[in-house]
Image (spheres, rainbow, N blue to C red):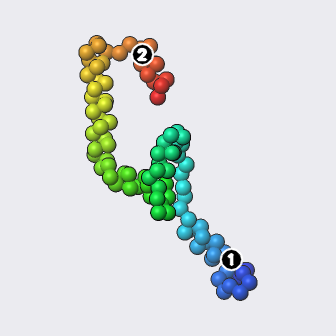
């Protein structure tokens, strides 16, 4: 039989299992200090950073976000067409910046 905590009828193993199942794995994201400071301004009333990010994502539909990214991509493609393509050395420079 699993050991019991003093005065607790639930075995220690069961308590550990409950705690393990109750916790969510978290991910670490890197932010520039300025971004962190801006994000802090959105926190209020006990909100977590996760709450803030979730709220911001709710306010900007994924389609709108991707439309903006597609617009930027299309503008780059048009520029490349007008300039007659892209040189290999320019491509290497651009990839180094990513």
63 over 58 or under it: above or below: above
- Return the residue nearer the eye: 15 or 49: 49
- Return the residue nearer the eye: 8 or 52: 52
Q: Which residue is mark 1?
A: 12
* Dots 2, 1 in contact, CB < 8 A: no
Helix, strand or loop status at disc 1: helix
Which mark, residue 90? 2
Q: How many marks?
A: 2
74 over 28 or under it: above or below: above
Residue lying at 25% horizontally and 15% vertically, measured from the top left:
82
43 over 67 or under it: above or below: below
Residue lying at 27% horizontally and 39% vertically, measured from the top left:
67
Residue lying at 56% horizontally and 65% vertically, measured from the top left:
23
Residue 16: horizontal and vertical position, in percent? 64, 72
Helix, strand or loop status at disc 2: helix
Alpha carbon of mark 2 to alpha carbon of mark 1: how far? 62 Å
Going from N to C along the chain, the mark reached first, 2 or 1, is 1
Q: Does the rendering let one see residue 46? A: yes
- Return the residue nearer the eye: 78 or 9: 78
To which quarter of the image does residue 78 belong? top left
Query: Which one is in front in this view, the residue at disc 2 or the one at disc 1?
Result: 2
Residue lying at 51% horizontally and 45% vertically, measured from the top left:
36
Residue 47: horizontal and vertical position, in percent? 47, 60
Which mark, residue 87? none
Q: Does the rendering let one see residue 50? A: no
Tell me the crowding category of disc 2: few under 14, some 14 to 19, or many 20 or more residues within 10 angstroms, Cα based. few
Residue 55: horizontal and vertical position, in percent? 38, 56
- The quarter of the image holding the N terminus is bottom right
Tell me the crowding category of disc 1: few under 14, some 14 to 19, or many 20 or more residues within 10 angstroms, Cα based. some
């Amino acid at each position: 039989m699993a050991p019991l905590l003093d005065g607790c009828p639930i075995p220690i193993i069961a308590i550990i299992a409950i705690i393990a199942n109750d916790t969510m794995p978290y991910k670490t994201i890197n932010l520039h200090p300025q971004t962190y400071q801006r994000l802090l301004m959105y926190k209020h009333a006990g909100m977590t950073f996760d709450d803030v990010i979730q709220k911001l994502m709710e306010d900007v539909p994924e389609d709108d976000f991707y439309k903006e990214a597609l617009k930027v991509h299309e503008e780059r493609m048009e520029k490349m067409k007008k300039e007659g393509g892209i040189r290999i050395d320019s491509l290497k420079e651009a990839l180094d910046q990513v």
